[in-house]
């Protein structure tokens, strides 16, 4: 998980804000590296599970909750699969920037609407929403690698790196998620995403700093 690796690469004693923390899947794995772990989650049922990992969990709308008040600026803000659910993601980005320390980073993931599966569907005139994935029916905005970068740069951030995640092949073929196929399938999907990220990347993970 690229977001996890990037948070842990920042060291220990971190102040981290996790936006849309859900059941706390990331929080439980970074907890030991955090001096102060805060978060905002809209879904009260998911938050019931995840809130126990936080020093300061807030339940409610992201745009309202992000204002805190928080007890200190953050070394890292994580927004994993969040902005695509908002009609005006630039408002959340503008609210994030002053919450970061001068050397702090924003770690952001966005689904890749230019992924091969979406392009192939469009060839046949299909743009069908689904319960999950790139065309999740709750997505309000869609991004490519370039438009994700543009969004960040237009709202006061400087992009440091962009990484593509592997396509979850096991969702289409469940056997690829089980031994002995799981390891080779995952490695092949990751290699493909690195070779041709704009076509075969499933998500893009952006690391950005305040400009």
Image (cartoon, rainbow, N blue to C red):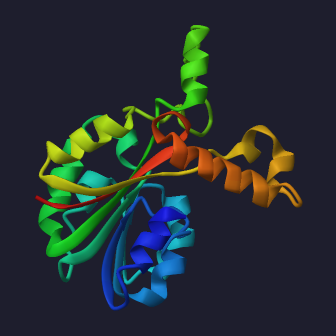
Q: Nearer the viewer, residue 150 or 53?
A: 150
Which residue occupies the foreground of this view, 67 or 99?
Answer: 99
Could you say which quadrant of the image residue 15 lies in? bottom left
**Residue sitting nearer the eye, 92 or 143:** 143
Residue visible at 39% across and 40% down in the picture = 84
In this view, 2 is above or below 71: above
Q: Where does the C terminus fall, quadrant-wise? A: bottom left
Residue 174 rendering spot, x and y as whole percentages: 83, 46
Residue at (17% x, 46% y) in the render: 153
Residue at the image position 37 percent from the left and 32 percent from the top: 141
Q: Is residue 9 visible?
A: yes
Where residue 166 appears, as percent x and y from the top left, is 59, 49
Residue placed furthest toward the front: 195
Q: Position of residue 117 (x, y in %)?
A: 61, 28
Task: Tell me: 108 left or right of 200.
Answer: left
From the viewer's perspective, tell me whether residue 200 is left or right of residue 183.
left
Q: Position of residue 1 (x, y in %)?
A: 55, 64
**Residue at left offset 20%, top offset 43%:** 90
Count of numbered tags: 0
């Amino acid at each position: 998980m690229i977001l996890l690796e990037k948070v842990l690469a920042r060291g220990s004693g971190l102040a981290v804000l996790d936006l849309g923390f859900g059941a706390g899947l990331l929080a439980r794995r970074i907890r030991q590296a955090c001096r102060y772990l805060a978060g905002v989650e809209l879904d009260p049922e998911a938050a019931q599970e995840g809130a126990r990992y936080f020093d300061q969990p807030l339940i409610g709308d992201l745009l309202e909750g992000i204002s805190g008040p928080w007890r200190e600026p953050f070394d890292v803000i994580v927004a994993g699969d969040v902005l695509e659910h908002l009609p005006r993601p630039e408002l959340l980005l503008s609210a994030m920037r002053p919450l970061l320390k001068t050397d702090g980073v924003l770690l952001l993931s966005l689904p890749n609407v230019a992924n091969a599966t979406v392009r192939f569907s469009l060839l046949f005139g299909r743009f069908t929403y689904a319960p999950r994935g790139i065309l999740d029916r709750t997505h309000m905005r869609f991004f490519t690698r370039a438009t994700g970068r543009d969004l960040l740069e237009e709202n006061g951030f400087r992009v440091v790196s962009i990484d593509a995640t592997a396509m979850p092949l096991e969702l289409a073929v469940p056997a690829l998620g089980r031994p002995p196929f799981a390891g080779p399938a995952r490695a092949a999907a990751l290699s493909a995403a690195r070779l041709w990220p704009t076509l075969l990347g499933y998500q893009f993970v952006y690391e950005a700093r305040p400009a």
